[in-house]
Amino acid sequence: MDGWLKILIASACAVIIAGGAFYAWSEWSAHRERQARAERRDGAVKELFELAKAGPNEVDKVREFCKQLKERLDGDLKDNDLAFGVSTNCRILGYSY
């Protein structure tokens, strides 16, 4: 009976360690994903400010750029996928009207 108890305790410890490792890995993966998402968002914001030739605090300039871009999408930029992507970033990041 003593041997079974040792095996049971060892198995329980192994299960707890495996569960803790799985939880830690899941949290680390989620943290990396959140960090990557934030970096992509920051990159998109930086790109919008560069395209609008705006300084860090010139949000109105970026909004005006996004407004003009949206208007031009129906005209000369109709088939431009890059302009459509930038316009989508304007909308998602809250810079379009």
Image: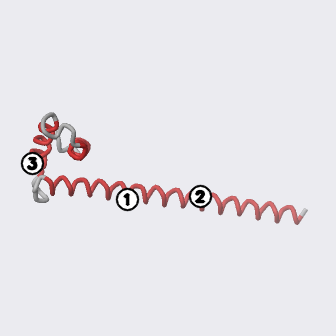
Residue at (33% x, 56% y) in the render? 38
Q: Is residue 96 above or below residue 12?
A: above
Residue at (88% x, 65% y) in the render? 2
Q: Nearer the viewer, mark 3 or mark 2?
A: 3
Residue 21: image x %, image y %? 60, 62
Q: In terms of sequence position, does the residue under pointer 2 or pointer 1 come before the other?
A: 2
Q: Amino acid under label 2?
A: Phe
Residue at (10% x, 56% y) in the render? 54
Crowd tier of the residue under label 2, counting other residues whose Cα lies within 10 Å: few below 14, some 14–19, many 20 or above: few
Label 2, on which residue?
22
Residue farthest along the top direction in this orientation: 74
Q: Amino acid under label 3?
A: Asp
Give the quarter of the figure containing the C terminus. Answer: top left
Q: Is residue 60 left or right of residue 38?
A: left
Label 3, on which residue?
60
The number of numbered badges drawn on the structure is 3
Q: In terms of sequence position, does the residue under pointer 3 or pointer 1 come before the other?
A: 1
CA gap between label 2 and label 1 equals: 20 Å
Q: Amino acid under label 1?
A: Gln
Label 1, on which residue?
35
Crowd tier of the residue under label 1, counting other residues whose Cα lies within 10 Å: few below 14, some 14–19, many 20 or above: few
Residue farthest along the right direction in this orientation: 1
Quarter of the image for residue 13 reads bottom right
Q: Is residue 27 left or right of residue 58?
A: right
